[in-house]
Image: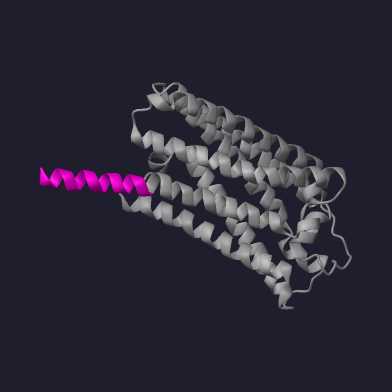
Amino acid sequence: MFLFVISLCELLASFLTSLCVMVIIVLYLRTGRKNLCKAISLPLLALFLSTFVLALNFFVGCIELFLVFLNIMENSSSTSLLLFLNPIMAHVFGTWCDFASVGLFVQRTIMVLKPFHSPRVHAVVTGSIVISSLFASVSILYVNVSTYKPVDIPLGESCYAFYCLASLGIAERTLTFYLRLFATLVVVISGTIFVISYMRTRQVSSQAAEDRFASFVRYTFIVRTVLLIYFIPDIILSKTIGKNLSDFTGPSLMLFVSINSLLTVVVYYVVVLRRQNKATTVTVWGSTNI
């Protein structure tokens, strides 16, 4: 029953996350900004897209779980192989989110410290993040798929579908472990540098739009740090003793990740888009009376 409730919450959270990302993109398109790369910074666009595909990945996984609950799909490793890529892709898309966050933190740190810099700096930062994330993602995908071995044993009563496939070895690959751990540590370091830089130079900021966006990035770092408090012990336990936190707390990590992604998108709407729309409305109304 507990697993069913968690899966239902996860299904709802992943659906809302995907919906919110689509709503934000539609809002930008409605304002006439058809070039999203110019309307949204590339690291932020990468963060939204990786969040979107990660939420879809979890959504598919939850549907698989409900098929097992309804006895439409047999709860065994052989049938779960139909969607065995689900846990692997969760790591791939999670790596995209990590590197996109790093790119966002680095970009905003540069904007805070040196507001008047060459656009070439943005291109270098974006290119480095894209190349690094693609290399890490392809490596995770190739190593896991090429070394995967089906396990012809029935899955336990408390172990369902792709949750079990992850615990049977996919989430414990050495390369996956080190890449995810490296990515999370870089997220923490780059985010910390940004927050320190932002707090030191906040009083000299004169652009309200830039200040709103910087506040969003700061909130994003706080939200992701809370997630990493859960995620880092999980991957360390899976590597050292072969256990995941889900073995003790149930499959709550996926729900935690989806809530984290949902909060990131909602905070962006509240802190940046909503206030930006209010400011635009006030300006137009004032100019009409003049």
Residue drawn at (80%, 65%) of the image:
159
Left or right? Give the position of 238 relative to 269: right
- Farthest residue toward the left? 290
Magenta stretch contains residue 152 = no
| Residue 8 drawn at (x, y percent) | 63, 68
Quadrant showing the C terminus:
top left
Q: How many labels, in total?
A: 0
Residue drawn at (49%, 38%) of the image:
217
Could you say which quadrant of the image residue 111 lies in? top left
Left or right? Give the position of 224 relative to 219: right
| Residue 100 drawn at (x, y percent) | 56, 39
Q: Main secondary structure of the magenta part?
A: helix
Residue drawn at (45%, 56%) of the image:
22
Residue drawn at (30%, 48%) of the image:
278
Left or right? Give the position of 239 relative to 276: right
Q: Could you say which is closer to the camera, residue 41 or residue 278?
A: 278
Q: Is residue 211 visible?
A: yes
| Residue 50 drawn at (x, y percent) | 56, 48
Quadrant showing the N terminus:
bottom right
Please provide the residue range marked out in magenta.
Answer: 274-290
Q: Is residue 157 above or below residue 124?
A: below
In this figure, which colouring scheme has been used for the structure? one colour
Q: Is residue 123 visible?
A: no
Left or right? Give the position of 278 relative to 73: left
Could you say which quadrant of the image residue 158 lies in? bottom right
Magenta stretch contains residue 279 = yes
| Residue 282 drawn at (x, y percent) | 23, 46
Q: Is residue 260 above or below residue 165?
A: above
Q: Could you say which is closer to the camera, residue 221 or residue 48?
A: 221
